[in-house]
Image: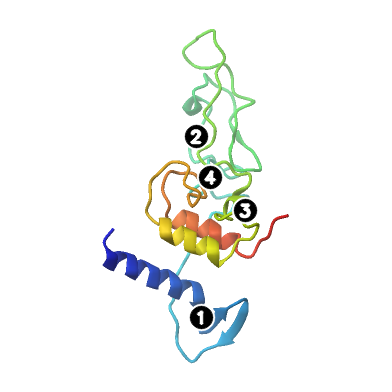
Amino acid sequence: MNDKKILVLIIFIFSAFFVADGFFYFNKEVFASGFAGVQTTVKIAICGNNIKEAGEQCDNADLGGASCSSQGFSGGTLSCRASCDFDTSACSSPSGGGSGSYTPLPPVVPQINLAKRSDINQDNSVDVFDFNALMVRWGRTAKNDPADINRDGVVDVFDFNLLMVNWGKTFH
């Protein structure tokens, strides 16, 4: 990404982060502003809202068209755990008739510790330092990058969404 695109991205995110609906947010204080502000929409995946969204394998009854067969089993009933990943315990033996055991791949986005993973710099607080770390790594595709909060292989808007969902959380 060239410097001009990075600058535009940083300005956009800074504007979206600090100005919304005519109010200015700074240091957890809200100030009314005469400025109309920047209108932006951020879509955040919420596990448990009955809608399968980015970063979820499923959400309650919404399996996104998946079945036991699509997960490598010969049949059975696929269901969804409360953590929005597949529960294959009611699926029957693996397809192909092999004699070995079959373990489905783990979910692309492990649902546990997403809040803790949002603490990119590991100072036990999700704050502006984590935001800065995310922006510095924006667009990277390296595996195991700490800024890739959802572990999908790229630092992008989905990681930004998780950072914002967990903003202000502290850990002990």
Relative depth, front residue between 2 and 105:
2
Q: CA distance from mark 4 to mark 1?
A: 30 Å
Where residue 41 is drawn, which disc sits there? Answer: none
Q: Which residue is mark 4?
A: 56
Is 168 located above or below residue 108 in the figure? below
User: Residue tagged by mark 1?
Assistant: 21
Where residue 76 appears, x then y in whole percent?
58, 23
First along the sequence among labels 2 and 3: 2
User: Can residue 95 be seen here?
Assistant: yes
Please tell me whether mark 3 or mark 1 is closer to you in this view: 3
Percent of width and height locating residue 36? 45, 86
**Mark 2 crowdedness (10 Å alpha carbons): few <14, some 14-19, many ≥20:** some
Q: Which mark is residue 115?
A: 3
Which amino acid type is marked by label 2? Ala
**What's the amino acid at mark 1?**
Asp
Residue 44 seen anywhere in this rendered image of the structure = no
Label 4 sits on what residue type?
Glu
Element under disc 2: loop
Residue beneath disc 2: 66
Could you tell me how far apart the alpha carbons at marks 4 and 3 are, in whole angstroms? Answer: 15 Å
What is the C-alpha distance between the residues marked 3 and 1? 26 Å
